[in-house]
Each structure stands twice: as structure tokens, then as C-alpha cells.
Image (cartoon, coloured by chain):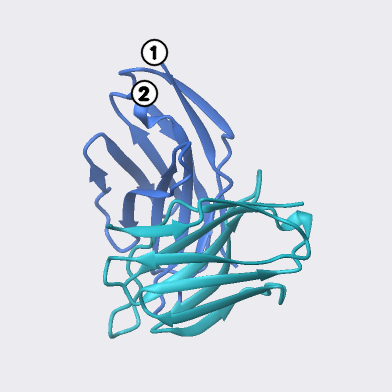
Chain colours: A cyan, B blue
């Protein structure tokens, strides 16, 4: 596998379910990101992890819980979601240099989530 | 806060012809990066081209080139010799050049149709 992979590609869940989205990057990057893409809206940054530490939480509701066990893997744990959370969730990774400069972000194929 | 505006929700072009997608942005920073990403029906975000604000020379990548007008805060994408595979949603994005700047700010996208 190369690049950024995401599983599952499609997910349907009820509002009481608990599920997790997985992202894995094979680029040797040290920063990872979760984005939400809703219909007819620009991509919205949700979370940023640099060197496994969360550096940004863009006012995301607590029903979304990220986890970054190492610099290659990123999870998004979902629980008690709402129908308005239905969207495409994109993962991205990039390299952050020693000076803190972030290089270009590369995206995975996304997980299409439908909350019933 | 930075904003990115794509004023063309939809564009179409004949195969082998040239098309230009518009993007304007608003920022008070002098150091930043601009990107064009392509999102085909597969939904994966693919980097098309990147421009550093400190570089006066317009970036080019094969059939893709930009017209970067820093004073006007304009960053248009020109696709030459359009191919059917170029059909996709195109997003313009901005990122701060500050070491702490990791957020990508996206425009709302332009849906490009390529007619055979």
C-alpha cells in the first residue's frame, strides 16, 4: 500500500452505534489530519496531530473522538452521532520539518458516512 | 481570518481545449502557500499544483499552470489540452506560512465537466 489509506470506504450507522474510522499513511509523515466534507460546503478541518500529539481541535463535538497511537495511524471514534454528521470524512498527512514548517498535505480516499 | 473564494460553481470545456478556473483569497499575511486540489468521483483529494507566495514565478505541472497575482490576491488554474480524466471538482486552498500554521482553508469548489 502506498499513500494514505482509509477504512471503511462506506459506513452506515444508527445514532446509538459506536464505530471507528481508520486512517493509515505510508509516506513517512509525522502529521495527520481529519477533515469533514459535507454536501455543498468547503472542507472543514476537524483535528490535527503533530508527532502523535493533538495540536488542533476545531470545536468538534465530543461525539467525535480522535486517537493517534503513532505517526502512521489515526482513528476517529464515533458514538451517538446525529443525522447531520453524515458526510465524507477525509484523512490527510504531511511532513512537519524541524522548524515547524508543514509540507503539502496528501489525502486519503475518504469514508462516506451515513447516520440514520 | 483567511478566506478563499471560488466564484464559479461549475465550468465546462471541450476536450483538448483550455479552461481557466478562478480563485481569490483574502489574507493579511505575506508568507503563505496556495494549492489546487482535484477531487474526482472517487472522492480522493489529489494535489494538482502548489505555489509559494514568495515565488514570483508561476508554478506549472505538465498541462496545469497557475496565474498567481499576489497583489490582486488571485490564484487561477489553467488546464491546457483538457482530457476526459480532468473532469472533477477542483478546490483552491490556502495555508499560512507561519510555522504554527497547519490549517488548510478551502474554497467551495468548481465542478469541471469535460465534453468529448
* Relative depth, front residue between A14 and B3: A14
The answer to whether marks 2 and 1 sit on the same chain is yes
Q: Are marks 2 and 1 in contact (CB under 8 Å)?
A: yes
**In the image, what residue occupies the spot 55% across and 79% down?**
A56
Please determine whether, in this image, residue A22 is positioned above or below residue B72: below
**In the image, what residue occupies the spot 59% across and 34% down?**
B9
What separation in Å lies between label 2 and label 1 (alpha carbons)? 7 Å
Q: Which residue is mark 2?
A: B84
Give left or right: position of B51 versus B100.
left
Measuring from the top left, give residue B52's x and y in whole percent: 32, 60
Q: Secondary structure at mark 2?
A: helix
Please identify the quadrant where the N terminus of chain B is shown.
bottom right
The disc numbered 1 marks a residue on which chain? B
Mark closer to the chain start, 2 or 1: 2
Query: Is residue A55 visible to the viewer in this orientation of the structure?
Result: yes
Residue A46: image quadrant is bottom right
Please determine whether, in this image, residue A25 is positioned above or below residue B8: below
Q: Secondary structure at mark 1?
A: loop
Q: Which mark is residue B116?
A: 1
Amino acid at each position: 500500500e502506498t499513500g494514505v489509506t482509509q477504512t471503511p470506504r462506506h459506513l452506515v450507522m444508527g445514532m446509538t452505534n459506536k464505530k471507528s474510522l481508520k486512517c493509515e499513511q505510508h509516506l513517512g509523515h509525522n502529521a495527520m489530519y481529519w477533515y469533514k466534507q459535507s454536501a455543498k460546503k468547503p472542507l472543514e478541518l476537524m483535528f490535527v496531530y503533530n508527532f502523535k500529539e493533538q495540536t488542533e481541535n476545531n470545536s468538534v463535538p465530543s461525539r467525535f473522538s480522535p486517537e493517534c497511537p503513532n505517526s502512521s495511524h489515526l482513528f476517529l471514534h464515533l458514538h451517538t452521532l446525529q443525522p447531520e454528521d453524515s458526510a465524507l470524512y477525509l484523512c490527510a498527512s504531511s511532513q512537519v520539518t524541524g522548524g515547524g514548517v508543514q509540507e503539502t498535505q496528501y489525502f486519503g480516499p475518504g469514508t462516506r458516512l451515513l447516520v440514520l | 481570518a483567511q478566506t478563499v473564494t471560488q466564484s464559479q460553481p461549475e465550468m465546462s470545456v471541450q476536450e483538448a481545449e483550455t479552461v481557466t478556473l478562478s480563485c481569490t483569497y483574502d489574507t493579511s499575511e505575506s508568507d503563505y502557500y496556495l494549492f489546487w486540489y482535484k477531487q474526482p468521483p472517487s472522492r480522493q483529494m489529489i494535489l494538482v499544483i502548489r505555489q509559494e507566495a514568495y515565488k514570483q514565478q508561476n508554478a506549472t505541472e505538465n498541462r496545469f499552470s497557475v496565474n498567481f497575482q499576489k497583489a490582486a490576491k488571485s490564484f487561477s488554474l489553467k488546464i491546457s489540452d483538457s482530457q476526459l480524466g480532468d473532469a472533477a471538482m477542483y478546490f483552491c486552498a490556502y495555508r499560512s506560512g507561519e510555522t504554527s500554521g497547519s490549517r488548510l482553508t478551502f474554497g467551495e469548489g468548481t465542478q469541471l465537466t469535460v465534453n468529448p
